[in-house]
Amino acid sequence: MQPEEPTIIIGIMKTSIIKLSSLLLMLLSGITATAYDFMVDGLAYNINSDTSVSVAYAQEYSSSGLTTVNIPDSVTYNGKTYLVVAIDRSAFSHCSSLVSVTIPNSVTSIGNYAFSGCSGLVSVTIPNSVTRICTGAFKDCAALAVLEIPVSVKEIGENAFERCSSLSVMVIPDSVSFLGSQAFRHCTGLKSVTILGQIPTINDGLFDHCTALTDIQIPNSVKSIGDYAFFYCSSLSGIVLPESITSIYYGAFKNCSGLVTIEIPSGVTRIDNGTFEYCHSLSSVIFPDSLTEICDYAFSACSNLQSVNIPNSVTTIGSYAFLSCSKMKNLSIGSSVSKIGYQAFANCFKLERIDSYPNPINVELQSAVFQEVPKDRTLHVLANYVGAYQALDQWKEFTHITGDLTGVVIPGDVDGSGKVNVSDVTTLVNMILGVVAKDEQAADINGDGKVNVSDVTALINIILGVK
C-alpha cells in the first residue's frame, strides 16, 4: 500500500496549488474573492460533496461590469456532474452593476452577504427550493423593489434585507419560523408587512427606521417584541398587538411619532425602559390588569397623551416614566403602587386632576416626582388616607386634598395592602411611635377618636377573628 501515498499527496498538493494560484491571480488583478475548486462558464464553484457544489463568485466579480447572472442547476467538471445547491458567503457582494439574478430550483441556501452591496440589483427570483436566506444576504440592495419570499423558506437571517430602501411590500410566508434581528432595518420605503409565519418573537431592531411603514400584521405566535423592534417607524399610526405577547422590551416603539393609540396585551407584566418614549402623537393607552411595572422613560415625552389610568396591579412607576407628557390632564394612580421614581410625572404642566388610591405611607416617592405640576389642582384620595397625604412630603404640596374617592376599605388594613395581617400591626405600632406618618382614620381601629395601644388590641382581635 505504501506506493499509493505519493499519488495521494501529489493530488492534494495539486488541488491546493490550483486554489492558491487562482487566489494569487485574483489578488494581482485587483479583484477581491476567495479560492475555489473550479470554474465553468465564468462562475467559480466550491465542491461540497461528491454530488454537490456551491457558487463561490463570478469571473467578472468586481465593483463594476457584471450585470446579469444566470446560475445553472447543475455543472459538469472533468466529466463529473454536480448539483448546484448553494450560493456561498459574499459570492456576489458589492457587484454594484449587477441588475438581475436567476437562481435555479436546486439551490437551498443563499449564504451570508451573498448579494450584499449589489446596489443596482433590481430583479431576483428566489425559487421554492430555498430554505435559508442567511445573514446580510441582500443587505444594501437599494434598488431591489419587488421580492417574493417563497413558501419553502424557513429562516431569514439577521440584516438579511437591511437598507433595501426600495422594498415597499413584504409578505413573510407561514413557512418562516425565524426572522433575524434587524432583517428589515432601514428599509425606508417599506409600507406594508404581513407576517404569516409562526415566529416566536419580533426580534431586536427588526423594523428599525422603517420610516414609511404604515401597516403591519403580527401573528398570534409572537410572544415578545424585542429591543428597538419598531424604533423610528414614524409613519406607523396604529398597530394591533396579539394577546399572545407577554413581553415588550427596551425602546420597542421609541420615536414612533405617528402612533396614536395602543392597547397593551393582557399578558404583559412590564413595560420596559423607553418603550414608547417620544411617541408624540400617542393620545390613548389601555393598560392590562396584569401589568406590574412601568419602567424608566416608558412614556417620556409622549406630548399628546391626555389621560393615564394606571391599574391597581402596578407596583412600580419608574423614573421619568411620564416625563414631559405636557398635555396630560388626568392621572389615576392604582392602589398597589409602592414606588414612584425620580421625576416620574415632572413637567406635566396641564395636569388638572390626580386620583391617587394607594396608602401614601406605603409609597416610596423619589425626588421631584411632581416637579412643575400645578399644586393648586385637587388631589383626590380615599377618605381614610387624607391625613397621611397631608402629612407626607411632596403629597402635602398639593393645596387641595379631598377624600372623595370610593374604594373598598378593609377594616384593619392599616398599610393599605388589601390584606389584614401582622404587617398591619407593625405599621400601626410604628404610627403610634411616630416612626411613620400617622393616618388618623386608618389607624383609629376602634373608632374612639384616638390612636393608641387599644387600637393595636382591636387590630389583633380582627386578625384573630375575635369580635
Image (cartoon, rainbow, N blue to C red):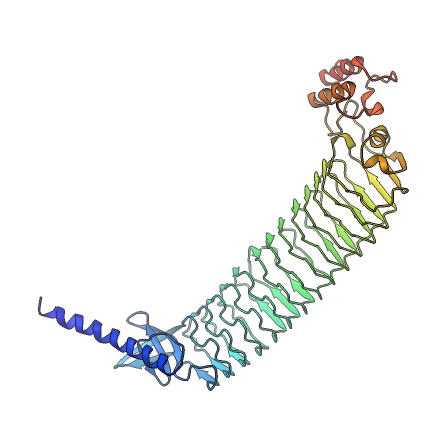
In the image, residue 404 sits, relative to residue 279, either above or below, namely above
Q: Nearer the viewer, residue 39 or 393?
A: 393
Q: Which residue is drawn at 14% across and 73% down?
A: 7
Q: Where 255 sits versus 47, above or below?
A: above
- How many tags in the picture? 0
Q: Position of residue 370 (x, y in %)?
A: 80, 43
Residue 209 vs residue 46: left or right?
right
Residue 359 in view, yes or no: no
| Residue 278 seen in the current view | yes
The quadrant of the picture occupied by the N terminus is bottom left
Judged left or right of residue 356, residue 105 is left
* Left or right: where 90 falls relative to 279: left
Q: Quadrant of residue 24?
A: bottom left
The quarter of the rendered structure image containing the C terminus is top right
Q: Tell me what residue is drawn at x 69 percent, y 20 percent.
A: 422
Where is residue 148? Give x, y as percent.
Answer: 55, 73
457 or 154, nearer to the observer: 457
- Please give left or right for residue 358 compared with residue 405 in the image: left
Q: Is residue 411 above or below residue 88?
A: above
Report x, y in % for residue 140: 54, 73
